[in-house]
Image (spheres, rainbow, N blue to C red):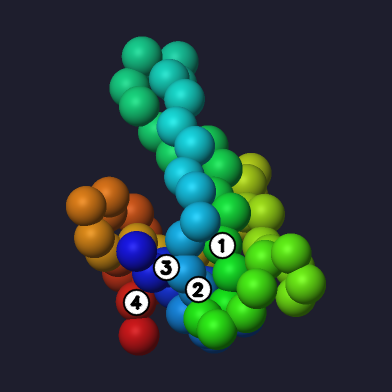
Amino acid sequence: MKIWDNHNKQWLDVTSIYFKNNESNERVVWRITAIKPGDDALSDGWYDIQGEDLNQIAIDDMVKMNTELLP
């Protein structure tokens, strides 16, 4: 699964997506970890996206989120 990082204008490969229940008891994305394609998470590092940063990424796969941000 790939996500579009609109803040840094780059595609990222998702390593994990965490969900939680919001106040309305709906499942929402709480945190995403991702890496640049071709990078190794242990040697090159990874992106830990949560909080307000989730508003800057788009997903258009089995999970859909902020699709209006896609290039």
**Label pair 2/4, CB-CB below 8 angstroms:** no
Residue that mark 4 sits on: 70
Instruction: Point out the image quarter for the N terminus.
Output: bottom left
Badge 4 amino acid: Leu
**Label pair 2/3, CB-CB below 8 angstroms:** yes
Q: Quadrant of residue 38?
A: bottom right
Mark 1 secondary-structure assignment: strand
Mark 2 secondary-structure assignment: strand
Q: Position of residue 18 (x, y in %)?
A: 49, 37
Residue that mark 2 sits on: 12
Placement of 66 over or under 40, stated as above or below: above
Residue that mark 1 sits on: 34
Q: Nearer the viewer, mark 4 or mark 1?
A: 1
Badge 3 amino acid: Ile
Other residues around mark 4 within 10 Å, as few (<14) / some (14–19) / many (≥20): some
Mark earlier in primary sequence (1, 3): 3
**Label pair 1/2, CB-CB below 8 angstroms:** yes
Res 6 visible? no
